[in-house]
Amino acid sequence: MNSSIKTFCNPLLQQKTFLLFLLFSGFFIQKTHAQTEVMPWGNITGIRVDGQLMEFESRLSVVGKDGIKTASTGKERQRPKYTREGNTQIVATKIDSLYFTEKVEDLSRGKTSVDIQLTANADTALTGTYFALMLPAGYANGSVQVNGSAAIPLSTLVKGDQSQANTSAKTIRLVSAKQQLLLTLDGNASFIIKKNAKSGNYEVYLPIQTGAVQKGQNFHKTFSIEASGEVDKLPIALSLNTAKQGREFAGFGGNFRIQNPKLDPQVIDYSLQNLRVAWGRVEMPWRFWQPEKNVDPTTAAQGGKLDVHVQQAMEMAQRLGKMNIPVILTAWAPPAWAIVGKPNFRPVNGIWGNPLDKTQTPEIYKSITDYILYLKQHYGVEVADFSFNESDLGINIRQTGEEHAELIKGLGAYFASKGLKTKLLLGDNSDATSYAFIYPAMKDPATKPYIGAVSFHSWRGWETEILQKWADAAAELNLPLIVGEGSTDAAAYNYPAVFAEPTYALQEINLYVRLLAICQPLTILQWQLTADYSPLAGGGIFGDNGPLRPTQRFWNLKQLSSTPKNVYAMPITANRPNVSCAALGNNATGVYSIHLVNNGTTRQVILTGLAEKVKALKMFVTDQKRAMNQEKSIAVTNGKAIFNLGSQTYTTLVTD
C-alpha cells in the first residue's frame, strides 16, 4: 500500500470529514435516499429493490398535432433544473412553450410517486402530453393486467410496429419473467400501449392532457410506480490473469483550468493536498496571450504586461511542475487574428467554433511555441503535451481529421526546431464517439514522431465497442492513452445539485473502472479539480456556504487516486451482471490493486488468479455511508479470496 492511503485513512480524519458531509447533505433525513433513480432532466431509469435496479425509463413526451412528431425529455435536450427535498427529487424543465415540474418521491420499499404539474405558456395545437414508460427488452414476452384482470400477453395486445392499444384503467400491472411494475393512476384514466418501431420494445403512455392547450392552462397528474422482481443474489466469480501485463496506469489526474479565481483555489488546494495527482491539464489562454498579431507577446510579458489570465494559468502549471506532475497544455479560445470569421463561443446554426486561418499558420505556430518557451524559461515548466480542446467539435477551434494531422506534423516539427520536447495529443476529442477524427493522423507515418499520447473525453460513447476503438488506436500506435476529461454529464453545471447524488457518484466511478479495464489509460483526468464540476461541497461553491467538505464523489476519486504507482493493466472478468471490475498490478514488485463497482445487491465474491505469494488483501469501501473505510482484511489462500461485496459500493482491494 502506498503512503497516500496510509496517511489519508486516519480514522479520526475520516470520521470528522464524512460526518460533516452527512450533516450538510441532509443524509440523516433521507432514509430511502436514491431508491428511485431520477436523471436531472426528468427521466426515471428505475427503482432499486434491495439494491438491485428494476430497470425501465420514463420520459415526458409532447406529441404534435399530426400524432407523429414527438419531443421528449432527455440528456442535453433541454436546460432543466434539478433539486432534492428529503426523499423527493424535483425537476423543472420545458419543451417548447410547455413548462413541467416533476416531483418524484420515494414512498416505501420499491414504491415511488410521480407528481407532474404542466403549464402552457402559449396556445399550441397538440395530440397530447404524456408520462411515458419505456420497458426493457425483458418484457418482449411479458404481459399486462388491467384493473386486476387476467394476464394479457403484450404481443397480442399490440400488433405491428405502428399499432397501439388505447384503453382506461385504475391500475396497470406489467409483468416480465424477472420483473413487475404496478402503475396506479389518478382515477380511472386512459393509457396507451405501443411497440417502438426501432427498438421493438413496448412503451406505455399515461396522458397528462390531450388535445390543444391555451396559454395559461394548468394541468396536474399523479401516478405511483411500484417495482418488484427477482434480485440477483448469486455469487460473483472474478477471474484474474496476472500472467498478462498490459499498459501502465500512472495514476489518477485532474484538470486545473482556472475559471473562478475566487472559488477555484480552495478546491485546488484541497485536491492537491489529499489526492495523489499523477497528471494535470491546464489552460493556455491563447486569446489573452497574444490578442494582437503584430504585438510580440514575449516582449510584452517581459515588459510587465502579462495578462492576469495568462499569469494564473502559468502559475497553475508551475505549481504542478514543482510537484513533479506532468503537465498537458490545452488551448480553448483562440485570438481573433488566428481564425476564420468572428469568434463563436456558442453554436451558430448547430456548428461550434472556428477553423484556423491557414494563411496565418507560421504566426500561429510561433505564438503557441512562444507561450511554451516562456512557460519553460520563466516558470520552469516543461510541457509534456499540447492540444486544442475538442477540435473535433469546435470548443473553440474546429478542425477536420486531415487538418488535425497537418497540425500535428507542422506544429510538432516547429516545437522540435525550437528545442522543445513537447508533443501533441492525438485527438483530445469531445467524446469517444468521434473516433474517426483521429484516423487520418494515424494513417500518416509523418505524424508519429510528434504524437505524445492518444486522448479523448469521456462525456459520451460508453459502449464497450466504442471504447475499444480507442484502446486499439493506442495499441496500434504503441502510445499511451489519456482520458483528457473524465466525468459523465457535460451539462451538469446547469443542475449542480446532482453532484451530491449517490446515483451520479456511482455512475461516474463505474465509468472510470470500465475505462481502466477496456482502455488501459495512462491516466484519467477529472473534469475538474476546481470549483467547476467540483467534487467538494461548501465554501460558496454552487451557492453552498457551508464549510468546504468532501462528497461521496471525492472519496471515490481519493480511493482511485490511491492506486499504487508502477502498476499495469491486467485482465479480470466477472461472471455476473451489474458488477464492473478492473485490475492493476506489477508482477515484479508483487503489488496488485483491484477496483470493483457493485451496481446490484450485496453478493459474495470468489476471486481467483492472485499470485501465490499474496496472502492478504486490504479492502477499502466508499458508498453513501462509508468514506474510503478500511474494512477487515481478506485472507488469500492459493491465489483465492472470498469476501462480500456491498450493494452500490465502490470497493478497492490492495495487497499488503
Image: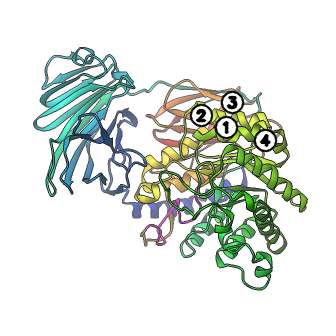
Q: Nearer the viewer, residue 375 or 582?
A: 375
Residues shaded magenta: 527-542
Per the image, the residue denoted by label 4 is: 479
Q: Nearer the viewer, mark 3 or mark 1?
A: 1
- Name the amino acid type tagged 2: Ile
| The disc label shown at residue 466, or none | 2
Residue at 53% x, 43% y: name it.
460
Q: In this view of the protein, which residue sits in the foreground, 656 or 325?
A: 325
Amino acid found under the numbered disc labelled 3? Pro
Report the residue marked by disc 1: 470
Q: CA gap, disc 3 to disc 1? A: 17 Å
Say which quadrant the C terminus sits in: top right
Secondary structure state at the residue bearing disc 1? helix
Of labels 3 and 2, the one closer to you: 2
| Coordinates of residue 621 in the picture (x, y in percent) | 54, 46
Secondary structure under the numbered disc 3 in the rendered image? loop
State the residue lying farthest toward the bottom. 304
Kindly check if marks 4 and 1 are in contact, taking CB atoms under 8 A apart as contact.
no
Image x and y of residue 501, in percent: 42, 52
Q: In 3D space, how far apart are the residues under numbered discs 4 and 2 (Cα atoms)? A: 18 Å
Q: Residue 634 occupies which quadrant of the picture? A: top right
Q: Earlier in the sequence, mark 4 or mark 3?
A: 4
Residue drawn at the location 35% of the way across and 57% of the way down: 81
